[in-house]
Image: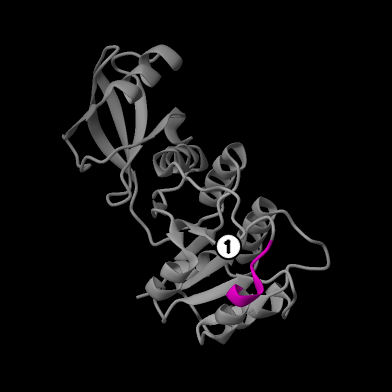
């Protein structure tokens, strides 16, 4: 990373010159026993609000640590405002989705329960932990919000009508590249993707979604993609065609 600092940590505390940041047992254990870091060594900190800061370890033990904030290395900047709503899948693969969606710039992760969803419980704290770790490793200045799981009907009711909802429709639709190119041309800055379960959406679910004015069904190509592949594909295509241009919005 910058200035020879390789370790980045996400913290909740405010960050400012001369401030101190206490760490709990998990992060203290990580610094002391995993990374073998001690007093005087550097760590990069970010909290999603104040940019990135260089800090030094003032004291560290197995159960606690204190970091002294030295200087800001990067100011906070806007990031893309793109949501990912997805039907949850089995444990290792949902962890993978949380990690890679964070790397690809998703600002919100929202598990959605559909008629064909095979998973009935989602560990949102585990999703958040995966998102934090991915943000630390990918040089992001924020961590995506992680929403509690919602039924598809509840997600539709709660979805802001001024946020475009792009539906990955396995039955067909215009190519996603064409839709996103139009979004870029129209400077559409608030968007989200909806990815269905392994068995696909039920026909009544698709019918309802297609009738909503803020929903645009799209095709991801001729091949039938696994749910986790589809989730990462839409975000990768978004980054390629729209990317950081969506970060600059009111």
Number of numbered tags placed on the structure image: 1
Q: Left of 106 or right of it: where is 222? A: right
Q: Quadrant of residue 172?
A: bottom right
- Residue where numbered disc 1 is placed: 115
Residue 203 magenta-highlighted: yes
Residue 228, percent across and down?
A: 65, 51
In the displayed structure, would residue 113 be above or below residue 162? above
Q: Left of 174 or right of it: where is 104? A: left
Camera-side residue of 72 and 209: 209
* Segment tinted magenta in the rendering: 200-205
Q: Quadrant of residue 28?
A: top left
Residue 195, percent across and down?
A: 60, 62
In the displayed structure, would residue 204 be above or below residue 122? below
Q: Left of 137 or right of it: where is 210? A: right
Label 1 crowd (10 A; few <14 / some 14-19 / many >=20): some
Residue 166 magenta-highlighted: no
Name the residue located 62 percent from the left edge and 62 percent from the top edge: 196
Name the residue located 40 percent from the left edge and 48 percent from the top edge: 143
- Colour scheme: one colour
Residue 201, percent across and down?
A: 64, 67
Name the residue located 56 percent from the left edge and 66 percent from the top edge: 194
Q: Quadrant of residue 67?
A: top left
In the displayed structure, would residue 223 be above or below residue 228? below
Camera-side residue of 80 and 29: 29
Rendered-image quadrant of the C terminus = bottom left
Q: Which type of secondary structure does the marked residue at label 1 adopt?
A: loop
Name the residue located 16 percent from the left edge and 34 percent from the top edge: 18
Residue 31, percent across and down?
A: 37, 19
């Amino acid at each position: 990373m910058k200035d020879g600092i390789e370790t980045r940590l996400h913290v909740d505390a405010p960050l400012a010159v001369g401030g101190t940041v206490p760490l709990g047992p998990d992060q203290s254990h990580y610094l002391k026993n995993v990374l073998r870091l001690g007093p005087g060594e550097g760590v990069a900190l970010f909290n999603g609000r104040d940019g990135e800061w260089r800090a030094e370890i003032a004291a560290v033990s197995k159960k606690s640590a204190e970091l002294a904030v030295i200087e800001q290395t990067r100011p906070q900047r806007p990031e893309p405002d793109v949501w990912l709503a997805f039907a949850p899948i089995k444990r290792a693969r949902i962890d993978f989705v949380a990690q890679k969606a964070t790397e690809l710039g998703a600002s919100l992760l929202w598990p959605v329960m559909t008629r064909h969803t095979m998973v009935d419980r989602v560990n949102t704290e585990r999703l958040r932990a995966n998102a934090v770790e991915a943000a630390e490793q990918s040089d992001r200045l924020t961590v995506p919000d992680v929403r509690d799981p919602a039924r598809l009907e509840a997600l539709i009711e709660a979805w802001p009508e001024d946020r475009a909802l792009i539906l990955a429709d396995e039955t067909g639709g215009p190519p996603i590249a064409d839709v996103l190119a139009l979004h870029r041309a129209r400077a559409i800055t608030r968007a989200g993707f909806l990815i269905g379960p392994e068995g696909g959406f039920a026909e009544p679910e698709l019918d309802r979604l297609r009738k909503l004015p803020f929903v645009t069904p799209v095709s991801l190509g001729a091949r039938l993609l696994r749910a986790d592949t589809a989730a990462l594909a839409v975000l990768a295509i978004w980054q390629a065609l729209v990317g950081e241009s969506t970060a600059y919005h009111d």
